[in-house]
Amino acid sequence: MDLWSADLGRPKNPDNGRLKMMNYKMYVENYSVMGNTYTGCYDISVHVIDEESPKNNCGSEILLNVLDSSGIITINSQDHLGEYSEIITNIPKIIEYHQQLLQI
């Protein structure tokens, strides 16, 4: 596994892929398909339902209960903070303030 980001020269988050894999697992209850009814953690990437694991171990439940989100994506800081950064730059004298901090 490549743990180094070629563009930034710093370690990547090795768990990033594992976190994104949670997007592919959703908990279904009494889900009917082709005459059968299923309850469990459904992995949409391989079309398998884990009927043994507890509900709170399923990716969709972890994302919802821990991160209060239905899914995650990879994003850079500019895209993540884009509009916020634009708003901050409109605060009077904020640029001068940051320039003074950087000179210390």
Image: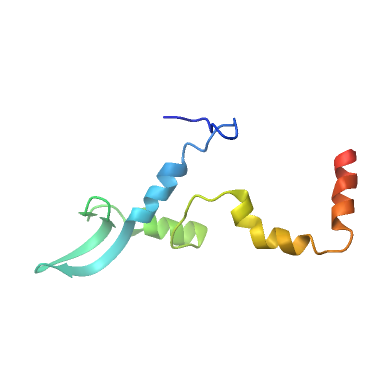
Image spot of residue 32 (x, y percent) = 17, 70
Placement of the N terminus among the 4 image quadrants: top left
- Residue 58, visible in the rendered structure: no
Identity of the residue drawn at 10% across and 67% down: 34
- Residue 41, visible in the rendered structure: yes
Q: Is residue 40 left or right of residue 18?
A: left
Image spot of residue 77 (x, y percent) = 62, 50
The colour scheme used to paint the residues is rainbow
Image spot of residue 82 (x, y percent) = 65, 58
The image shows residue 16, relative to residue 6, as above or below, that is: below
Placement of the C terminus among the 4 image quadrants: top right
In the depicted view, which residue is nearer to us: 41 or 6?
A: 6
In the depicted view, which residue is nearer to us: 29 or 94?
A: 94
Q: Is residue 3 left or right of residue 43?
A: right
In the depicted view, which residue is nearer to us: 53 or 18?
A: 18
How many numbered discs sit on the rendered protein? 0
Q: Is residue 23 left or right of residue 80?
A: left
Q: Is residue 18 left or right of residue 26?
A: right
Identity of the residue drawn at 56% across and 32% down: 11
